[in-house]
Amino acid sequence: MVSSMRSWVKGDVEMTTSFLFVRNQRDGYLDVTDLGPDTQAAVKISGEAARYYADEPWIEVILLGADSLETLRSTHANWFPDWEPLPLALG
């Protein structure tokens, strides 16, 4: 499954990086690959990975875009079961 990718621009700088997540639901192993800012290439690679694992239903393949992996750790915490977010600094 491939999520839709949205990007935004801050000044002249592209702020989205694509990350490919491959998770083995049997043993909990998670591999995250930074695919960079080229979303078309990332979608192609993600599709290739999904086809590669198509006969292994316990393997999940998703493509997410964000400004950083830390953002994804916060917004998709269920993909990082051993990660504990730092407390937010208020003030």
Image (tube, rainbow, N blue to C red):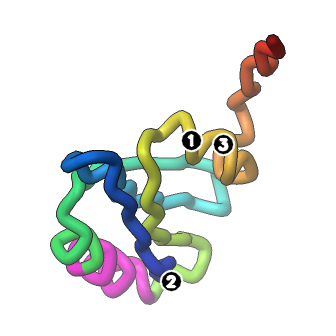
Q: Is residue 80 left or right of residue 90?
A: left
The image shows residue 36 at horizontal and vertical percentages of: 23, 52
Q: Which residue is mark 2?
A: 1
Label 2: element kind: loop
Residue at (17% x, 72% y) in the render: 41
Answer yes or no: is residue 17 visible: no
Closer to us: 22 or 13: 13
Location of residue 83 with respect to 47 vertically, above or below = above
Label 3: element kind: loop
Q: Which residue is mark 1?
A: 71
Answer yes or no: is residue 65 visible: yes
Label 1: element kind: helix
Sooner in the amino-acid sequence: mark 2 or mark 3: 2
For the image shown, how many numbered marks are present on the structure? 3
Location of residue 78 with respect to 46 vertically, above or below = above
Mark 1 neighbour density, 10 Å: few (under 14) some (14–19) many (20 or more): few
Q: Which residue is mark 3?
A: 80
In magenta, the rendered stretch is 44-54
45 in the magenta segment: yes
Residue extending farthest front: 11
Rendering quarter of residue 20: bottom left
Residue at (47% x, 40% y) in the render: 69
Amino acid beneath label 3: Phe
19 in the magenta segment: no
- Measured in 3D between alpha carbons, the distance from the residue under mark 1 to the one under mark 2, in whole angstroms, is 20 Å
- Measured in 3D between alpha carbons, the distance from the residue under mark 2 to the one under mark 3, in whole angstroms, is 18 Å
- Measured in 3D between alpha carbons, the distance from the residue under mark 1 to the one under mark 3, in whole angstroms, is 12 Å
Sooner in the amino-acid sequence: mark 1 or mark 2: 2
Residue at (22% x, 80% y) in the render: 44
Could you tell me if the residues under marks 2 and 3 are in contact, i.e. CB atoms within 8 Å? no
